């Protein structure tokens, strides 16, 4: 019998998240002949659209139509999954803000192991799945062994598995709405507050001068401003700069900020967490300036300068001025 | 409001270059600078602000060795009222579930209205808060970047989600929240502040004090075990420009011109 793997599909405005097909690839890496089941929740036309799309990639699609599930409140989805998933299930979900909310608690309620933020699978050794993870902001990788004989909840990092576009599953949509069970919640979804629009739209810029923790002090931001001016670029930043309230949230690049598509991206004093890199699309020419050669940004940059940006950037600005 | 904040002592990745030992068993820890996990520090600040607004107390707790006492003391210098250190040889090597179980055992001895953790720590897992909530059968919200106390029964909390948007929820108390950085501006703690709390006693509780059997935690109880550390593969990796600062700048200007980076 083929191994069964379950996933949960997140979608927005009738469009499935990229993770829907990334999880197909991840499941096939786990078990090449896996029988895949997608759980899709919601109500109305969007739900039916997503279910029929997913049937192309999953052998079974479990549709749960319930107005209580119009918004995926992790507490409610957790209850639902405990009610419908078989004991000892292998369950994959994206390590996005929903999966991070859902999975740790789900693993406790399902009495299974939990693997957060998996970046690769390296096969089974008996009951033990060998998983690659990262620690210390991506500066060290680690292998973990996880006994999955009694099931597992596995969060898969977004973007690390190439979406499986084969769409050859020829699956069936099964309406499981009647099995949803009791779904009352102590946490109630109210609304989404949209991000504020700032004075510049970094998503439309071709050249970004982006600063991170390495800028060290708010007063030093003028070094980046001066470089941006001579380059004809706009200043953006990584999360710590916004946390420190030095720049507006609208200038933050990353999964929790803006997704940008520049031609050239200057990463100044940015270590390059996966959340930051997740906000850079379209394969720009990335230049990394960082004191720490171990910073993950050097893995994705085309060109690196190992230096203190406070010394190097003014030098670069002067050279550009000289023409 | 009685508030508990779970904190962790971690190597400060902003201050350290992380190196893996040649045998892969661990990272090089000899010269590491340790500090309180950044996310936890925001959680403690938030707890202090809530207490100052509505009354109550803030307790900080950690699972660790005697060196972890210094981070408890630091957070007490910030304004936390009490510290509790959970320490036992049996706790070593615990996975996330083990840690959550240790915390649960201590937490059940008291009545807390609000339990906060950082959204993640040095291992990037972000798991203890959600596990703890499930073990205690309490509601949970992760990645919280705003908290508004409505009354002693419920709060309005914002969660940071993709695209810079915020998901607003109403949540019943007691509850567990994991706190995202940027929710507030943690206050500065000076040497004098730490001296002031130097003599405060911090109780140390072991496995038997909190009534958990040592085979359910530590390495023995772990389902998820770290095998080794290795340096991330460099992919294609960046071409590192060499030379004097001036030479590097000149090379980079040429590259940027060619790629359309200078208008």
Image (spheres, coloured by chain):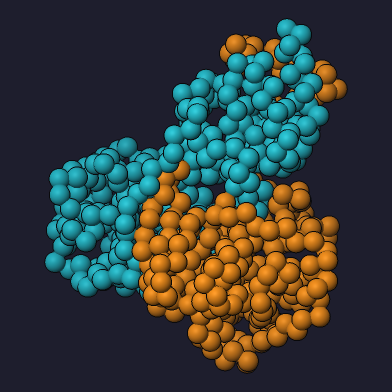
Chain colours: A cyan, B orange
Residue B142 x/y as whole percent: 46, 61
Q: At 65% across and 53% down in the image, what residue appears?
A: A136
Q: Does B247 appear above or below B109?
A: above
Residue B217 x/y as whole percent: 58, 80
Q: At 57% across and 51% down in the image, what residue appears?
A: B182
**Which is nearer the eye, A235 or A273?**
A235
The answer to whether residue A317 is left or right of residue A282 is right
Dividing the picture into quadrants, the one containing residue A82 is: bottom left
Residue A298 seen in the figure: no
Give the position of the C terminus of chain B as an image quadrant. Answer: top right
Q: At 56% across and 59% down in the image, what residue appears?
A: B120
Q: Does A1 appear above or below B210?
A: above
Dividing the picture into quadrants, the one containing residue A195 is: top left
Residue A87 seen in the figure: yes
The answer to whether residue A265 is left or right of residue A294 is left
Figure label count? 0
The answer to whether residue A144 is left or right of residue B204 is left
Residue B87 x/y as whole percent: 69, 81
Q: At 59% across and 77% down in the image, what residue appears?
A: B57
Residue A201 x/y as whole percent: 47, 27
- Tell which residue pokes out farthest to the top in this image: A323
């Amino acid at each position: 019998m083929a191994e069964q793997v379950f996933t949960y599909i997140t979608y927005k405005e009738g469009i499935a998240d990229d993770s829907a097909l990334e999880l197909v690839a991840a499941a096939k890496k786990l078990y090449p002949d896996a029988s895949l089941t997608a759980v899709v929740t919601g109500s109305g036309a969007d739900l039916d659209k997503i279910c029929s799309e997913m049937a192309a990639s999953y052998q079974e699609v479990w549709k749960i139509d319930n107005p209580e599930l119009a918004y995926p409140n992790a507490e409610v989805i957790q209850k639902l999954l405990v009610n419908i998933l078989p004991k000892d299930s292998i369950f994959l979900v994206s390590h996005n803000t929903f999966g991070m909310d859902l999975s740790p608690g789900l693993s406790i309620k399902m009495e299974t192991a939990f693997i957060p933020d998996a970046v690769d699978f390296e096969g089974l050794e008996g009951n033990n799945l060998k998983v690659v993870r990262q620690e210390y902001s991506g500066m060290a990788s680690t292998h973990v062994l996880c006994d999955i004989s009694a099931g597992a909840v596995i969060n898969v990092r977004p973007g690390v598995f190439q979406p499986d576009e084969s769409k050859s599953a020829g699956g069936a949509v099964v309406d499981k709405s009647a099995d949803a069970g009791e779904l009352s919640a102590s946490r109630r979804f109210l609304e989404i507050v949209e991000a504020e629009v700032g004075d510049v739209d970094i998503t439309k810029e071709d050249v970004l001068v982006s600063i991170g923790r390495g800028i060290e002090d708010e007063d030093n931001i003028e070094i980046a401003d001066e470089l941006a001016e001579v380059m004809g670029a706009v200043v953006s930043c990584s999360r710590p700069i916004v946390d420190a309230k030095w720049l507006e949230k609208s200038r933050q690049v990353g999964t929790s900020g803006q997704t940008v598509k520049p031609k050239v991206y200057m990463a100044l004093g940015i270590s390059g967490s996966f959340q930051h890199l997740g906000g850079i699309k379209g394969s720009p020419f990335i230049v990394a300036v960082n004191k720490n050669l171990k910073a993950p940004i050097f893995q994705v940059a085309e060109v690196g300068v190992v230096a203190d940006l406070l010394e190097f950037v003014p030098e670069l600005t002067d050279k550009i001025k000289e023409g | 409001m009685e508030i508990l904040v779970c904190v962790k002592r971690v190597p400060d990745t902003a201050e350290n270059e992380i190196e893996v030992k040649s045998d892969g068993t661990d990272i090089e820890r000899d010269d590491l600078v340790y500090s309180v996990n950044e996310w936890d520090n925001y959680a403690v600040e938030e707890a202090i602000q809530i207490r100052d607004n509505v009354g109550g107390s803030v307790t900080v707790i950690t699972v660790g060795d005697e060196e972890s006492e210094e981070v408890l003391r630091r957070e007490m210098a910030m304004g936390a009222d009490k510290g509790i250190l959970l320490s036992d040889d049996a706790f070593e090597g615990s996975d996330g579930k083990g840690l959550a179980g240790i915390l649960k055992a201590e937490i059940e001895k008291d009545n807390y209205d609000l339990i906060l953790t950082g959204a993640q720590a040095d291992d990037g897992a972000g798991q203890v808060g959600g596990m703890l909530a499930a073990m205690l059968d309490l509601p949970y919200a992760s990645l919280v970047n705003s908290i508004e106390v409505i009354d002693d029964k419920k709060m309005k909390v914002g969660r940071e989600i993709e695209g810079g948007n915020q998901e607003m929820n109403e949540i019943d108390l007691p509850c567990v929240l994991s706190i995202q950085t940027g929710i507030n501006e943690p206050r500065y703690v000076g040497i004098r502040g730490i001296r002031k709390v130097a003599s405060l006693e911090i109780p140390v509780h072991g496995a038997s004090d909190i009534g958990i059997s040592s085979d359910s935690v530590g390495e023995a109880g772990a389902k998820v075990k770290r095998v080794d550390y290795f340096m991330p593969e460099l992919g294609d990796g960046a071409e590192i420009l060499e030379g004097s600062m001036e030479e590097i700048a000149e090379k980079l200007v040429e590259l940027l011109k060619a790629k359309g980076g200078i208008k």
